[in-house]
């Protein structure tokens, strides 16, 4: 199959960075092969070392394996457009964040920010391991809360599809055309010294 998975072949940084940042992207094509328990725990291990305010570690991950007892429930949370390609995922993950501080019960204004850091750790580790890690917003959050018994004190943030790389030719035509690493805006468009001037 075409080797489209190594994004470093098509992405170029404008400033010196670790190649892992270029290697990480979000393919949809997966083979349907399983991910081992060790591989999955390694991803969550990377996530747990993310930075967080007061070391709160607000992130929580609920997951289901393909063919497992909870797979149909998790798969049914996805919008149809994501179900089309997530049927070949090995694992589906729901990302949560605790909305209040454990030490005083007060609202935590950066719970989403911190949980995003944990996802990035997981995604970078997945890239290093040659796995597909694809974050998604396209799912029913209310249905997720009810189906997975998520308390009100936790925010439902995102879902993740994890799997082994597959052949892009297996995707529907409209997704096949998009199955390539995307570029990024220049630094000058995202970072400026001084007051807001974008």
Image: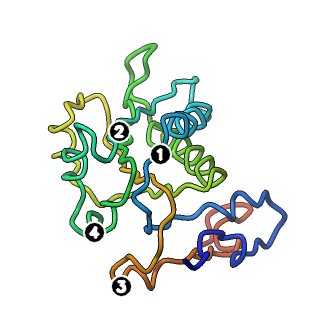
Q: How far apart are marks 1 and 3 (CA)?
A: 27 Å
- Which quadrant of the structure image shows residue 81? bottom left
In this view, the mark in front (1 or 3): 1
Between the residue at mark 1 and the residue at mark 4, the CA separation in whole angstroms equals 20 Å
Q: Which of 174 and 90 is in front in this view?
A: 90
**Spatial CA span between label 4 and label 3:** 11 Å
- Helix, strand or loop status at disc 1: loop
Residue 128 x %, y %: 66, 52
In this rendering, would 153 be left or right of 109? left
Disc 1 versus disc 2: nearer the observer: 1
Q: 57 or 135: nearer the eye?
A: 135
Query: In which quadrant is the C terminus drawn?
Result: bottom right
Label pair 1/3, CB-CB below 8 angstroms: no
| Percent x, y of residue 74 | 25, 46
- The disc, 1 or 3, on the residue closer to the chain's N-terminal end is 1
Mark 2 surroundings within 10 Å by alpha-carbon count, few (fewer than 14), some (14 through 19), many (20 or more):
some
**Which numbered marker is on residue 63?**
2
Which tag, 1 or 4, sits closer to the chain's start? 1
Write down the residue under mark 3: 174
Contact, CB < 8 Å: mark 1 with mark 2? no
Disc on res. 171: none
Q: Mark 1 points at which residue?
A: 35
Give above or below for 186 relative to 137: below
Cβ–Cβ under 8 Å for marks 4 and 3: no
Comes first in the chain, label 4 or label 3? 4
Mark 4: give few (<14), some (14-19) or many (20+) Cα within 10 Å: some
Q: Is residue 163 above or below residue 182?
A: above
Circle 4: element type: helix
Residue depicted at 71% across the width and 60% down the height: 194
Whichever of callouts 4 and 2 sits on the residue coming sooner in the sequence is 2
Please state the horizontal and vertical placement of residue 17, each as a whole percent of the image.
Answer: 80, 60
């Amino acid at each position: 199959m075409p080797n489209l998975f190594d994004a470093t072949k098509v992405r170029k940084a404008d400033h010196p960075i670790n190649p892992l940042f270029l290697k990480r992207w979000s393919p949809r094509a997966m083979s349907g092969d399983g991910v081992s328990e060790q591989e999955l725990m390694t991803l969550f291990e990377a996530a747990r070392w993310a930075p967080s305010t007061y070391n709160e570690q607000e992130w929580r991950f609920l997951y289901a394996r393909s063919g497992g007892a909870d797979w149909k429930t998790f798969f049914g949370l996805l919008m149809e457009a994501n179900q089309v390609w997530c049927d070949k995922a090995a694992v589906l993950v729901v990302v949560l964040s605790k909305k209040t501080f454990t030490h005083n019960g007060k609202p935590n204004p950066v719970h989403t920010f911190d949980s995003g850091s944990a996802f990035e750790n997981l995604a970078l580790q997945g890239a290093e391991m040659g796995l597909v890690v694809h974050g998604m917003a396209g799912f029913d959050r209310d249905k997720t809360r009810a189906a997975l018994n998520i308390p009100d004190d936790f925010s439902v943030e995102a879902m993740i599809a994890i799997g082994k790389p597959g052949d892009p030719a297996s995707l529907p035509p409209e997704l096949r055309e998009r199955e390539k690493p995307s570029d990024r805006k220049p630094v000058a468009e995202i970072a400026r010294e001084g007051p807001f001037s974008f």
